[in-house]
Image (cartoon, helix red, strand yellow):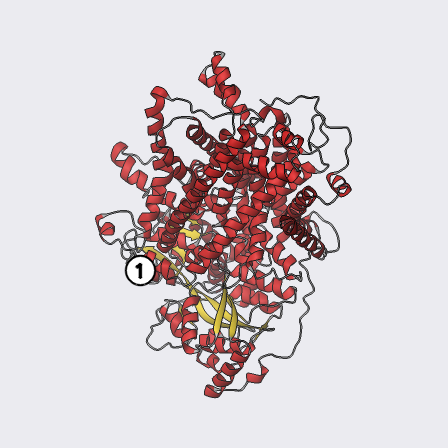
Amino acid sequence: MRHGALTAGLLVAGLLMSACGPSPTTTAANAPREKSNPYAAYEGLKGGKRTAKLLADAREEGGVLDLYTSNTDIQDLVDGFKKAHPGIKVRAFRANSETVLQRTLQENQAGKPQNDVIDTNDLELRALDSQHLLRAYTGPSARGLKPEAKGLGNWTAERFNAFVAGWNTREIPRGGQPEDFTGFADPKWKGKLSVEVGDWDWYAAMHTYLTEKKGMTEAAADALFKKVVANVKVAKGHTVQGEMLSAGQFGLALSVYSHTVDKAARKGAPVTWKPVVEPVILRPNGIGLMASPRHPAAALLWTDYVLGEGQKEIAKSLRIPAARHVPGYDEPVPAGTETFTLSKTGETETKKWDAAYDALLRGAPQAD
Amino acid sequence: MALISASRKDPAAPSQDPPPPSRPGLLTRLRRKRLSAQTLLVGGAVIVVGYLAVVPLGYLIHDTFLDADGSGVSLDAFSRAYGGNSQSGDMLLNSLWFALGSAALALILGTTLAYIQVRTDTPFKSLFFAASLVPLIVPGILYSTSWIFLGDPQSGLLNALLFKPLTGTSPVNIYSVWGMIWVQGLHLSPVAFLLMVAAFRAMDPSLEESAAMSGASRLTVLRRITVPLVRPALISAALLMFVQSLESFEVPALLGLQNGIYVFTSRIYFVLRSYPTDYGAAGAYAIGLLLIAAAGVLLSSWLQRSSRNFQTVTGKAFRPRPVELGRARPVVGVAVIVYFLITVVLPVAVLVYASLLKYYAAPSAETLSSLTFDNYRQVFDMPLAFTALKNSLILGLGAATVVMLLTAVVSWVVLRTKARGRRLLDLLAFTPIVIPGLVLGLALAFVYLRMPLPIYGTLLILLVSYCTRYLPYGMRYSSAAMAQMAPELEESAAVSGASWFQTFRRVLLPLMSSGILAGWVYILVVSFRELSSTILLYSPGKEVLSVLIWEQFENGQFTTLAALGVCMVLLLVVLVALAYRLGARFGLQGQADSSN
């Protein structure tokens, strides 16, 4: 018997060896495949008729949906969807946005796409879109969305993450916060501020805001950031940052998510982000229909839900919904607040911003 | 010491000193023989280990040295990685300093503890078990965060509750190189402890006794006899911990960044987080680490060149007799308790405390009155908790068993045969330690997406990934154990007519059992927290615990995370205790065998 097992083991090893023959290549041909639109059959359908047809077809496809997501509150949406459409099972792969992107790219390069829908950050969705892997959503739920949630390419924003300045109310006295971001250059903040080591997109947006909206020169914005960074402690990970803020290990976090602060405050932690230190940086997080789904009807059913009824779940988890109005919920960012969202052009220079932020924190000379 | 007569020339014995001038390669010899159990087992193990190591290494080298358009070989990736304003020189120095310090601290702590536990009649022996393993079980991110809450210069509990009232100062600053070395050293010391316990167990104390009888002082015995005898294990531990510290980013990221202490791996982190990802540059960094690691492996085999010096498991029976501490016993007892308090009780207490809070705040009447079990309820309510636990168990047990069996055979090939390429095999089996987890994940996804076998999207791909990742650890544990054994036992078995397979199973494996068990425990424990390759390779329905931990971590639920961490510590302590109880029986049997 041992002999048999050994032989089998060797056989497997041999098979593996022979199969790894082709040398790895990361530049697999990935020419845009203009295929027929898998969602065409449902275009133009509306209301109950659309839902009924989608549901029937989704069941026929196997009654499952394969979803790749970096949304850590996805379980609320999955539960809500299950309630709305009990027959469809959601298989969710959850990982950070970089991983979701890498996995999707790898599977598509190998010609084995595994997911129907993707739910992740704007940057990753833009990367997928540039590889022609997404299909635009044209369903009825798009109508209720804010204008800035649409027109982003072949994907649609489903929620916004708001980078805000959040502080510990025991460490920062009432009214002690500045009116806007430029106030943090004051040396009195030394050692009291915190930034996160990976938040280059926040940096890109804030820097662009200062030059585009505030009329600063590049050099002036750089100088301002240098002064701000002289006051900061660098944290790793928003969770540790948020927890240390609650514990009072620093007074104020410059780039924390509004929902992180709100969730901590809901549990009683002495933290807040209001009155708002302007600007609030908004980053769309979105949903994309895959160009080659295995379950197109289920994909549409999910997207209809997330951009429609599901917006309530997003509001419930204290995030900023993409819908113009969610019954029973107030918009977290107060009306009249100065907000800023990075334009598409800014997003295309990711390498530059990433390197600049890294160099800024390290105190290294900026690369050209 | 091994009493091998140099004149023996037994054709059945696989190893002989001195080496014959030229011998055919292992594979040739294997081919020449009929398909025996030995051929199959040894050949199979070598092939599997080689395959496991070559896939990610090949992927890495391909991405590093090939031009982006795939047309030619270039070194551009290296100038992108090390040139410009990357400050990689400074960072490498920081890294080396940090890695040397941590490895030294861990080696001293782990070895001392192991010696006291195995070789003395110290009180509180049972505490060692927890003291040596808990820091290993607690995920790095939680262990570091606990130390932040303990050692923050302003609000840290040690400063606020202990030093401030006593001395009026706040001397502890965890955000320094020393703080980083402290946390990393404590976190790593189990690696040394596990290896050294095995080494001390397999050591014949009669040598020490003879030295003592000849008038050597205790210190001299330690310096001239004990330490040299366990050199293979010491070197293995130092090498593992040094390279692991060079390669880790958790502790430097959480503790070093606050004061701008950047290490080498922060470059890898930086390169891997951006899109389009520059895998060439990431590979160039990994190859830099690989060179350091390779130098370490070669140095260690050079240091072990006179292999007979360490062979303490011989045909002679021995019974390890504890050193009587005498008057020092209470002192050692207190030291053990203090060590236990600092490395286990303090950080775990912070975790338990945090897990009972709604949000972290320093202890006060207010926080103590609002303790709650909500976080634990949330952990048990997670819909995936049970699936994840089951999958983590399967993978942890599977990877630990597969790796230790494979490396037991391969370490035999490396240490006992004169097969050509055995050093290369040793080196190859060490390479996965420097390959970033994400790159390993990508390499495996690349291969198995293109393979007709149904491996991608199943638990098997995670098993392959874990086996690859922990191969270097298994190799070090196995070869440290193998190096202590004199070949005469195998030879006598062979002379008595045992087949190679019988000898291996009945003589070698039992004798190596404490080393193998130590490696097995190490892999089981660390595989529960492997995330960087797991997160890319797992599939829905095949979640593991580390994915759940990651999710809580990303979601900003530190207190829930602490609760999950506490549950993990409890679970693994029970598992490991069981393993040791079972292993103790097996080991005793092994000892009995050796004295026959």
Q: Report the side of A233 relative to A264 (left or right).
A: right
Q: Residue at x 46, y 18 (%)?
A: B219
**Residue B244 visible within the image:** yes
Give residue A309's quadrant in the image. Answer: bottom left
- Work out whether residue B229 or residue A311 is closer to the camera in this orientation and state it: B229
Q: Where's the C terminus of chain B, which quadrant? A: top right
Element at label 1? helix
Q: Residue furthest front?
A: B497
Disc tally is 1
Task: Tell me: residue A86, above or below residue B432.
Answer: below
Question: What percent of the width, then of the height, locates residue B198?
Answer: 50, 33
Question: What percent of the width, then of the height, locates residue A110?
Answer: 65, 64
Task: Tell me: residue B506, above or below residue A365.
Answer: above
Q: Report the side of B508 relative to B154 (left or right).
A: right
Q: Chain of mark 1?
A: A
Q: Residue at x 66, y 58 (%)?
A: A26
Q: Residues within 10 Å of mark 1 (few under 14, many from 20)?
A: some
Amino acid at pointer 1: Ala
Q: Residue at x 56, y 26 (%)?
A: B312
Q: Where's the N terminus of chain B, which quadrant? A: top right
Question: What percent of the width, then of the height, locates residue B194?
Answer: 48, 36
Q: Residue at x 60, y 70 (%)?
A: A133
- Work out whether residue B167 or residue A232 is closer to the camera in this orientation and state it: B167
Task: Tell me: residue A196, above or below residue A278.
Answer: above
Question: What percent of the width, then of the height, locates residue B468?
Answer: 59, 48
- Work out whether residue A143 or residue B330 is closer to the camera in this orientation and state it: B330
Q: Residue furthest top?
A: B215
- Work out whether residue A347 or residue B406 is closer to the camera in this orientation and state it: B406
Instruction: Name the residue tied to disc 1.
Output: A265
**Residue B271 visible within the image:** no
